[in-house]
Amino acid sequence: MSKRILILEDEPALARVIQDYLIRDGFTAEVYHDGTDAVATILDTRPDLVVLDLMLPGKDGLTICREVRAATNLPIIFETARVEEIDRLLGLELGADDYICKPFSPRELVARVKAVLRRTDPKAEDGAPPRLIMDDATWIASIKGVSLDLTRREFQILHVMFNRPGRVFSRAQLLDLALPDDAAVIDRTIDSHIKNIRAKVKAVCADWDPIRSVYGVGYAFEL
Ligand code: CA
């Protein structure tokens, strides 16, 4: 059974392109251009994933996301036209599973759809990534019994993301949540910590990078 994707996008040409690419990749994809009945449609038809535009006629994406989330956890990928908007959306804790900024390539969206489905579907065990263990009593992170030798700060940053797989964190959020006592650090400090964490993971597990960079926004831990 192919996975069913529901696309809520009011620009017909864009909606069509997304639909074509998803169908080409083996998905079933339906398009709706108006937000008015979106929540009822989503809850009635229970798609496997929703691609949701922020600005829609009838009812906006934020409201739709909230109403759907009150009833179900089905995966949602938000589309927005402004990268600055993503920070605000993250702060609202909507529970969206990913964010993509327009203009995006349809190929990129299809890749995101697959990644979100992989991580939200407990049955999708194929090619399961190595298991990372984070022991917050000892501050040791390990893969297959081998310690990554993270510093305390690196551990704290990775731990915040690890606890909410897939959620995108801005640099400022990572600073707040992981290093609340470090008054002197600046946003870009996170980048160097992330670089070190990646290098340490790579030293233990050469072909696995658990941290996804989200351009213009921040980072997410990928299962
Ligand atoms: Ca729109």
Image (spheres, rainbow, N blue to C red):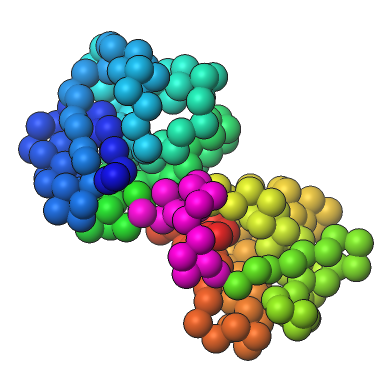
Residue 14 position in % (x across, y down): 14, 40
Q: How many marks?
A: 0
In screen coordinates, is 130 left or right of 80?
A: right
At 70% from the left and 76% from the top, the residue drawn is 143
Q: Which quadrant is the C terminus positioned in?
A: bottom right
Q: In percent of the image, x 55 and y 69: which residue is there?
A: 129
| Of residues 206 and 214, the one drawn nearer to the viewer in this rendering | 206
Residue sitting at the far left: 13
Q: Is residue 171 above or below residue 13?
A: below
Q: Is residue 43 magenta?
A: no
Q: Residue at x 21, y 52 (%)?
A: 26
- In the image, is 49 to the left or to the right of 29? right
On the picture, is 210 further left or further right than 43? right
Please state the extent of the stretch shown in magenta in the rendering. 114-129
Reply above or below: 177 against 193: above
177, above or below 186, in the image: above
Give how far across and how far down residue 94 sits, in percent.
52, 30
Q: In the rendered view of the protein, which quadrant contains the N terminus?
A: top left
Question: Is residue 120 visible to the viewer in this orientation of the structure?
Answer: yes
Residue 92 position, x and y percent, is 55, 30
Residue 44's quadrant in the figure? top left
- Residue 185 seen from this side: no
Q: Quadrant of residue 75?
A: top left
Looking at the picture, how far across and down is residue 108, in whole percent? 28, 57
Q: Is residue 196 above or below residue 222?
A: below
